[in-house]
Image: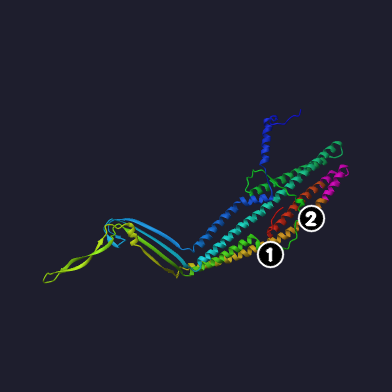
Amino acid sequence: MRHLFTLKNLKPAAFVLLLLSSTAVKAQEKITLEKAVQYALDRNLQIKQSQFTEALATEDYKQAKNNLLPSLSANGQGSYNFGRSVNQASYAYSNQTFYYVNGQAQASLTLFQGGQLHNQIVANKLTLDADKNNTAKIKNDLVLNVITTYLSVLNNQDLVTAAKQQIAIAQLTADRADKSLKVGNSTLADVSQAKAQVSTAELNITTAQNQLDLAVLTLKQYMEMDPTTAIEIDRPDISKITDVKSAYDANYVIGTALKINPDIKLAESQQSIYLQQIKVAKGNYYPTISLFGGIGSNYSSISQNVIGGQSITQQIGVVQGTNTPVFTTITSPIIATSYPFASQFGDHYNGSVGLNLQIPIFNRFQSRTTVRKAKLSYQNAELATQLAKNTLTKTISQAVLDVQAADKKYQSALQTYQANKDAYNVTQQRYNVGLVNSLDYNTSLTNLNKSQFDMIAARYELIFRSKVIDYYLGNPITL
C-alpha cells in the first residue's frame, strides 16, 4: 500500500521548518526592472518633496492672478460709553451713558502699479515651471541610478555563479591531486597548490556575494523598501542583447540633450525667473493708482429722531424804556419716542468713492538696490546655465568615448575568455593523462577564472554605457 505523505507524518520541528520555508517563498517578491523603476518613482521621498514644492508654487501662481481682483473688507464696532464722550451719531459731547454701534465696508482695486502685478504672475508661472523641471530631473536621475544598480545586481549574480563554478572545478582538481598523491603520481606541493586554488575560489565567491548583497541593498533603498524584505531579481537574458549600440555621433547626442535634458531645462527656467524679477523690481519706480470706495452707518442709543416741527411764540426780549415784550415765532422739533436700530442705520448711511495716487519719491534707494540685485542674480543664472551646458557637453563627450572603449574592451575580453577556455580544456586533458604538471594546470585555471570575470564585467559595462547614452537622448531605458 502506498504511503501517503501528510502533515501528521511530520515531526513538530520539520513541520515548523516547512511552514517557515513556505512563508518565505510566498513573501518573496519578484522584481523586474520596470517594477523597480516604478517602485522608486512612487515611493521616493525626494520626489514627494519636490512635488510639494510644485504644489506650493501652484498656489503662489494662483494668488498672483488673484491679486488682480479687487479687495473687499468689512468691520464693525460696538461700545458702551459713559462720562463725557462724543456721540458719533451727532458729533456732540454728551455726559450720558449710551450704546454705540458702527459698521463699515471698504473696497479697493489697483489700476496701475508699474506692471508689477502682471510681471509677478509671469514670474510665479516661471517658478512653477522650474519646480516641475526639478521634479523631472530628480525622476530622471533616480531612474538612471535604479537601472545602474539593477545592472550591478545582475553583474554580481553572474560573478557569484561563475565563482561557484570555479570553486567546483578547483575542488575537483584538489580531490584529483589528493588521489594522485596517494598513488604516487603527484607531490605534496601539487596538493598544496590545488588547495590554494580552492581557497582563492572561496575568497572570490565571498567577495562576489558581498558585492551582490550590497547591490541588492542599494536597490532596495532606491525603492524605499525594508532591507529585510526578501525579493527575487528578474533576470533578462543578457546574452541575447545583441543590439547594444556603441557608435554614436557626439554632436548629435549633445544637441539633443541640450534640448531635453532636465538639468538644462531647470537652469534655463531659473534664468527666466531672474529676468522676470528685474521687471518686477523696476515696478517700484512707478506710481500706484487705485480705485477705492466705502459705505458705513452707525447707531447710538441716545440719538433722537426728529419727525417734524411745530411753531411756537417765544419772548426774546423787551423794548428799552417801555418794557414792552418782544416776541418771535420759532420752530420747535418734534422728537419721536423711539429711534429703532434699523431706522438709524438707514438714516445714517454714508458712502464714498475716489482715486488714490501714491508716488514714490525717495525710499533710501531701496528700489534701486532691488533692481541691481535682480540684475546680478540674472547674470549669475546666465553663468549657471552656461556652466550646466558645458558640463553636459563634457559629460556626453566622455560618455560617447566610454561606450566605444567599453565595446572594444568587451570584444577583447570575450576573445581572451574564449582563448583561455580553449587553453584550459587542452591543459585539463593533458593534466588528466599526466602530461602537464599541477603548476601549469593551476595557472591555466587561474587565467580562465580571471578572464571569465573580466568578460562578465565588460559585458555589463558595455550595456551600462550604452544605456547612459539612451538616457541623454531621452530614449526609454529597458533591458
SS for dot 2: helix
The location of residue 232, given as percent across then percent down, is: 69, 45
Which quadrant of the view contains residue 53? bottom right
Residue furthest out toward the bottom: 321
- Judge whether 96 appears above or below 327 on screen: above
From the viewer's side, name the closer residue of 154 and 296.
Answer: 296
Amino acid type, callout 1: Gly
The location of residue 457, given as percent across then percent down, is: 74, 51
> Would you say residue 4 sits in the magenta stretch?
no
Q: Mark 2: give few (<14), some (14-19) or many (20+) Cα within 10 Å.
A: some
Q: Is residue 24 left or right of residue 78?
A: right
Residue shown at the point (61%, 51%) measured from the top left: 44
Query: Range of the magenta residues?
Result: 419-443
From the viewer's side, name the closer residue of 30 and 160.
Answer: 30
Residue 114 numbered tag: none
Residue occupied by mark 2: 411
Residue furthest out toward the top: 1
From the viewer's side, name the closer residue of 121 and 227.
Answer: 121
Amino acid type, callout 2: Gln
Residue shown at the point (86%, 43%) measured from the top left: 431
**Labels 1, 2: front one:** 1
Q: Is residue 320 left or right of residue 281?
A: left
Which quadrant of the view contains residue 124? bottom right
Residue occupied by mark 1: 255
